[in-house]
Image (cartoon, helix red, strand yellow):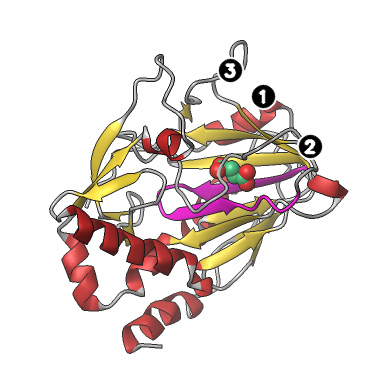
Amino acid sequence: MEEYALEAVERLTTRPAEPYETITVDPITPLLGAEVSGPDLSEELTPQQEKEIRHAFLTHHVLVFRDQDLTPEQHKRFASAFGDLHPVTLPAEGSDPYVLEIKATGESRSVAGNGWHADGTADPEPSLGSMLHITTVPGGTSGGDTLFANMHLAYELLSPALRGFLDGLTALHDGALPWTAAGQTPPPEYDVPRTEHPVVVRHPDTGRKLLFVNAPYTSHIVQLARPESDALLGLLYDHVARTPLLHCRVRWQPNTLTFWDNRCVQHHAVWDYFPHTRYGRRVAIEGTRPQS
Ligand code: SIN
């Protein structure tokens, strides 16, 4: 590994131990994700629990809580401890505008999120994060894992020269692209968002830089010719997909809730369980405009 990559990994693997009093935090890998035990999310959090979960979230970016038997109202209350709720895009008629059902069955011919992406980056203010509560796991015990990738590290593992080049660029994110990629057109009631964001942004809470492009939403890098943009974006997507040390994998059990930071991770829902059923609910939290 190059020296700059070793230094990026070392910064994380040599972090001082975190002093938690109300939660237990077991990292999934030294570089991304943690299992959190202690709090019962069906109850209101104490200020100390909230503070410690926030700290763990900013440190590990993906938090996994097991054995959480939650109603949608309790799920929303937990999410609202971290900000206003982010409404669902195109909610189904009669459904809760803040609760997105994540469902795949034997009738499904595609599933949401089956590819590396961040949520809703064509919006001017993409969500801060999402909490997915899975209640039905395919086959009862396995399948339907979700992969996550650390976009801070994705940036830091690039050569200093390439990082310097990317730092000054912006990219257009287009909300129509996921529809056209699926051979569909967006429904007429959808006010399709299109937003230019920096290719490298800073996390609003930590100031740490990260790579902010993703395959389903990013159309092109504005300052480059199209073939150049396509080649560079392809290189960056391959880097995210093919570098296992960026990744962690969450294996769901019934009543697992996972809270991920949509500002600095991408995720990929693996559809390896057809024709079985997987079911859960996702609540998202409002974010802010990404800044370089
Ligand atoms: C998504 O938010 O993209 C879905 C994630 C999942 O189903 O694991």
Query: Which x, y percent locates residue 243?
Result: 48, 72
Q: In this view, does 203 lie above or below 122?
A: below
Left or right: 90 as drawn, with respect to 163: right
Q: Does the residue at mark 1 contact the one at mark 2 (Cβ under 8 Å)?
A: no
- Crowding near pointer 3: few (<14 within 10 Å), some, many (20+)? few
Which quadrant of the picture is home to ligand 1? Answer: top right
Which callout, 1 or 3, points at the residue further toward the start of the chain? 1
Say if residue 181 shows up in the picture.
yes
Mark 1: secondary structure: helix
Residue 73: assigned label = 1
Residue at 31% across, 59% down: 233
The residue sitting at the right extreme is 140
Verify whether residue 271 appears in magenta: yes
Query: Which x, y percent locates residue 183?
Result: 46, 34
**Gap between marks 3 and 2, in whole Å?**
24 Å
Magenta part of the chain: 255-273
Residue 131: assigned label = none
Tell me the amino acid under the disc marked 2: Asp
Which residue matches tag 2? 69
Verify whether residue 92 appears in magenta: no
Left or right: 238 as drawn, with respect to 244: left
Residue 92: assigned label = 3
**119 or 85: nearer the viewer:** 119
**Gap between marks 1 and 2, in whole Å?**
12 Å
Query: Which x, y percent locates residue 150?
Result: 46, 62
Mark 2: secondary structure: loop
Q: In this view, does 85 lie above or below 20?
A: above
Tell me the amino acid under the disc marked 3: Ala
Tell me the amino acid under the disc marked 1: Glu
Query: Which x, y percent locates residue 75?
Result: 65, 32
